[in-house]
Image: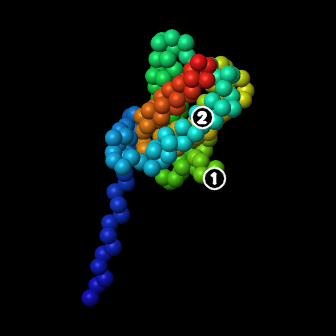
Amino acid sequence: MTAPAPPPPPAPSPPPGLLQECGLARPQPALTAWPPDAHLALALALALPVWVALGLLVGGRMHAPAGWAAWASFVLVQPLLEELVFRGILQGQALRLTTRQGVARRLGPVTLANLLVSVAFVALHLRAQPLAWALAVIVPSLVLGHLRERMGSAWPAVLVHAIYNAGFGLTAWLVQG
């Protein structure tokens, strides 16, 4: 009796397409899935205590957008453009360059791609903010990068960034009023 033939090796998965690589694919799970992704829900839930702490500790040094155009830019345009560039294109390409044999290089719990893009994100904020404020975006940036990698799309990062900015702006407006 002869031994059964071993199963054929799995077919190699096709390389990701440009839309996937740039984070423009549909998120998995979908943003409308119920229950929501636990990491997405946690990223949103932890924002509230941060806004309260900022309002109490920083208060008067916060600046709310002035006028509807500034609000639209702060809550819609900036999150969309920043996330499509940073989490979409840059992090997608950084992931491609730092992944070997299907495994992304990591520094502890964070991928090298996420860390590099987050440093670039802080550098962008240095142009318009004092050093301490610019450095403060590193944690939200790492969270947004994690969501991009976890869900395979930049769209969750766009949504969470918009909500973060809206909450920050609302907090600033409330403490000034």
Mark 1 crowd level (few <14, some 14–19, many ≥20, 10 Å Cα): few
Q: Can residue 142 be seen in this view?
A: yes
- Vertical side of 109 occupied by 47: above or below: above
Disc number for residue 108: 1
Residue located beneath label 2 in the image: 52
Q: Residue furthest bottom?
A: 1
- Vertical side of 130 occupied by 26: above or below: below
Indicate the position of residue 173 as horizontal and vertical percent values.
57, 21
- Vertical side of 74 occupied by 88: above or below: below
Indicate the position of residue 36 as horizontal and vertical percent values.
39, 46
Q: Quadrant of the C terminus?
A: top right
At 29% from the left and 79% from the top, the residue drawn is 4
Q: Distance between the residues labelled 2 and 1?
A: 30 Å
Indicate the position of residue 135 as horizontal and vertical percent values.
68, 32
Disc number for residue 84: none
Q: In this view, does 56 lie to the left or right of 3?
A: right
Mark 1 belongs to which amino acid? Gly
At 28% from the left and 84% from the top, the residue drawn is 2
Q: Quadrant of the N terminus?
A: bottom left
Rendered image quadrant of residue 121: top right
At 54% from the left and 42% from the top, the residue drawn is 46
Q: Is mark 2 on a helix, strand or loop?
A: helix
